[in-house]
Image (cartoon, helix red, strand yellow):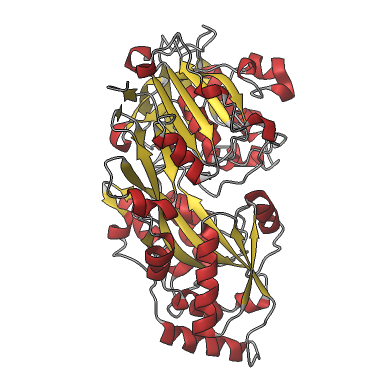
Amino acid sequence: MRKKSLFIASVVSLSLSLLTACSIPWLESNEAIPENKILRIMESNQISNLDSAKYVDIVSWNILYNVNEGLMRLGPNNRLVNGMAESVEVSPDKKTYTFKLRDDAEWSDEEPVTAHDFEYAWKRALDPRIKSEYAYILYPIMGAEEYNKGRGSANQVKVKAIDDHTLEVCLKQPEHEFLSLTTQSTYFPQRKDIVEKYGEEYAKSPDKMVYNGPFIIDSVTPTQVRLLKNERYWDKDTVQLGQVDVQVQADTSKRINFYNSGKADITKIDSEFVYAFKQTTDYTSLELASSQYLLMNQSKPFFKNPNIRRAISLAIDRNEIVDRVLKDGSKPAGALIPPALSVEGQSFRQRAGGEVVGHNPSLAQTYFNKGLRELGLTRPPESIVMLSFNDQRSYVALSIKEQLKAKLGLEIKLNTLPRKTKVDHELKGEFDMTMSSWFADYSDPIGFLEIWTANSGLNYMKFNNAAYDRLIKQAKAAASHNKKTSLMIQAEKLLVGTGEGQQAALVPLYYETNSFLQKPYVKGLHRHPYGAEYDLKWASVDGKQ
């Protein structure tokens, strides 16, 4: 996903009257719940969709993750723990999974959670008419991709409720991280009777959906959500919080004002405020399984040339970006797959022997001149436009513009756009260069690599390399972790490397770090480097006055 991800925004239209300086309803505490049972969180982005088959943004995912539960859950220390599944059996060939659901699993309306709810939800997300952005995450299941792409039927998707408490899933090939996949929102169960009852209005308001996770939604607008403890949740005794208020405020200084005045317990901060708070006890950060990078549209003749791409990658000083522009703990990226992702307990970057590319302006100039000669040019074109985000990353775009001008004489124009408009341009191929990112949906590094195969719908840069596609296909079919990792290392070097025969198809920029202010009394809130950003199940506000 997105996901995490390259999160494609389809933001609900927002009336400014929902958020005013003098009236913010969520700040009025529910008198039935004591203050030491209420957690208040400030978010920076809007909520778009609470239908787990259709959601696209990280804030919606955070909410969905805490009001629903899949077969497995990502627990403390990023370890998988059982969710709706009480047990799972895996066949010797590792292609058939048989899940046994809990007898005491209930929806918030007291109906039992059944295996049929999972079968229905997965097939609904795959239905081509739904147009789910994250349907591809179900593709390991036999028949799933064919159904989603209109080449098969729902009956051919090999997920089946054997009875109310038994779910059988058959995979196309062994999938080492399949249990991790089941923590994703697209894998959450849905009730057929509820979805069909409300139709297009399903999940548009809290009373038009049901919940099987630690919390339920009490109220929601695009900028605020109130969660209450779900008394029907199978593990409700573990849940300490009675209420969670999530408020969206794009302006960082306003979020900090709420935090400093005691009206929020947790808030995100961005790079311009990290320096001021980094030495305080309230500051905390999390290294994400997220990479920011630069894409070059290879349907354009200039960027189809590998030497031009190599030159651009070698010309950019990543340390300059993280140390002088971001200053938020992010790390320079010399590869695509971030250090926060591990394989069998070891960072993928360590397994790969470190970074793949670095800063070499002299070699960059050599490649650039060679590329110009191959293209029959005496100087670079002057009409190159780079798309960038309209947030703090616009400063990164400006740094890239200045560096390419100084080191290669390459003049680019910046087009800074809101996320949705930017993605629309990318989907249509209307760009020369564009800043982009990928946030891991789950623990498998393959997610960073498979989107650049020739037939991927997310391959906006139109990279097409048969050798690369073969490596990804072999990696996904590998019988062992070691073999799969070896193939992924080869594929990554081919994709981003700047040596002869390597493609430099995209330019790694930096590995992202999230920074927060969090009151010392907030305990047990688990943040994850991939998937949903936080889990409230184990959280408490011990000592809050």
Regarding residue 239, the answer to whether it shows in the image is no
From this viewpoint, which residue is outermost toward the top? Answer: 110
> Does residue 243 lie above or below 394 as drawn?
above
The percent coordinates of residue 433 (x first, y second) are 61, 68
Q: For the point 66% across and 58% down, which residue is it? A: 426
Q: For the point 27% across and 49% down, which residue is it? A: 279
Q: Report the front residue among 95 and 453.
A: 453
The percent coordinates of residue 381 (x first, y second) are 67, 82
Quadrant of the drawing holding the C terminus: top left
> Does residue 351 lie above or below 361 as drawn?
above
Q: State which quadrant residue 55 falls in.
A: top right
Q: Report the front residue among 250 and 458.
A: 250
Regarding residue 372, the answer to whether it shows in the image is yes
The percent coordinates of residue 14 (x first, y second) are 68, 35
- Horizontal arrangement in the rendering, residue 210 relative to residue 212 (left or right): right
> Does residue 421 lie above or below 353 as drawn?
above
Q: State which quadrant residue 372 falls in.
A: bottom right
Q: Report the front residue among 428 and 230.
A: 230
The percent coordinates of residue 146 (x first, y second) are 64, 41
Numbered disc total: 0
- Horizontal arrangement in the rendering, residue 430 relative to residue 246 (left or right): right
